[in-house]
């Protein structure tokens, strides 16, 4: 196998795994079925990554709602968050076995494969690659991160973000149905 072909395959694997990371992370943050301990870990990871990357929390909040700012600290926050979740090493190498083991049962595998195909891209570094795939995933699925979980409050205390998320999931399902009819 030529070295260029090998690099291309590695890049493709990297992107595929990055999308899986995004699917897992979004499923964890948006689910109301996780324990208090798991939610606390998500909040701690968020706070630790804010401190490490010096990202402005409002940029994270904007990205969680679909407004992606081209900011290096936000890109590295995204990578940091996945690293703290145990999906990538400090050098950005993906831990595929860990990722595969943590894919939630509620993730539609066929839809995930479709999104992976649509989101194949690679940034200039590990931070940017994870960020670009995350952004692409959001744009394809319109999944919003409930602010009450992302910011660290009790998810049962607010319903507006949950309702917005349900509405966005319905919109995404309708869009998928339209796409399937076209084929």
Image (cartoon, grey):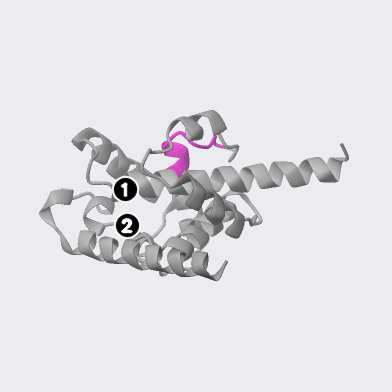
Number of other residues with Cα within 10 Å of mark 1, as a class: few under 14, some 14 to 19, many 20 or more = many
Estimate the x, y position of residue 53 in percent, counting from the top left. Answer: 45, 51
Q: CA distance from mark 1 to mark 2?
A: 7 Å
Q: Nearer the viewer, residue 27 or 106?
A: 106
Magenta residue check for 37? no
Circles 1, 2 touching at the beta carbon (< 8 Å):
yes
Quarter that holds the N terminus: top right
Image check: 90 left or right of 123?
left
Number of other residues with Cα within 10 Å of mark 2, as a class: few under 14, some 14 to 19, many 20 or more = many
To which quarter of the image does residue 67 belong? bottom left
Residue at image position (50%, 48%) is 110
Q: Decide: is 51 above or below 141.
A: above
Residue at the extreme left? 157
For marks 1 and 2 on the same chain, the one whose residue lies earlier in the sequence: 1
Kindly state the secondary structure of the residue where label 1 is placed: helix
Q: Decide: is 25 above or below 137.
A: above
**Start-end of magenta stretch:** 79-90
Estimate the x, y position of residue 103 in percent, counting from the top left. Answer: 43, 37
Estimate the x, y position of residue 33 in percent, counting from the top left. Answer: 23, 41
Residue at the extreme right? 2
User: Label 2, on which residue?
Assistant: 145
Residue at image position (38%, 38%) is 105
User: Can residue 26 be seen in the rendering of this structure?
Assistant: yes
Residue at image position (66%, 56%) is 124
Estimate the x, y position of residue 132 in percent, counting from the top left. Answer: 55, 59
Q: Decide: is 139 above or below 8.
A: below
User: Label 1, on which residue?
Assistant: 29
């Amino acid at each position: 196998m030529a070295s260029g072909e090998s690099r291309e395959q590695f890049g493709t694997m990297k992107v595929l795994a990055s999308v899986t990371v995004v699917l897992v992370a979004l499923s964890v943050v948006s689910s109301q079925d996780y324990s208090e301990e798991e939610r606390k870990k998500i909040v701690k990871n968020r706070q630790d990554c804010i401190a490490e990357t010096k990202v402005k929390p409002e940029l994270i909040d904007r990205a969680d709602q679909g407004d992606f700012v081209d900011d290096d600290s936000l890109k590295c926050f995204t990578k940091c968050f996945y690293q703290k979740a145990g999906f990538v090493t400090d050098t950005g190498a993906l831990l595929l076995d860990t990722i595969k083991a943590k894919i939630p049962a509620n993730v539609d595998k066929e839809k995930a494969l479709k999104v992976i195909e649509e989101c194949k891209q690679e940034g200039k570094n590990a931070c940017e690659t994870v960020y670009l795939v995350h952004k692409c995933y959001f744009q394809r699925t319109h999944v919003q991160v409930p602010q009450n979980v992302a910011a660290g409050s009790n998810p049962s205390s607010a319903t507006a973000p949950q309702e917005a998320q349900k509405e966005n999931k319905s919109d995404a399902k309708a869009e998928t149905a339209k796409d399937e009819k076209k084929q």
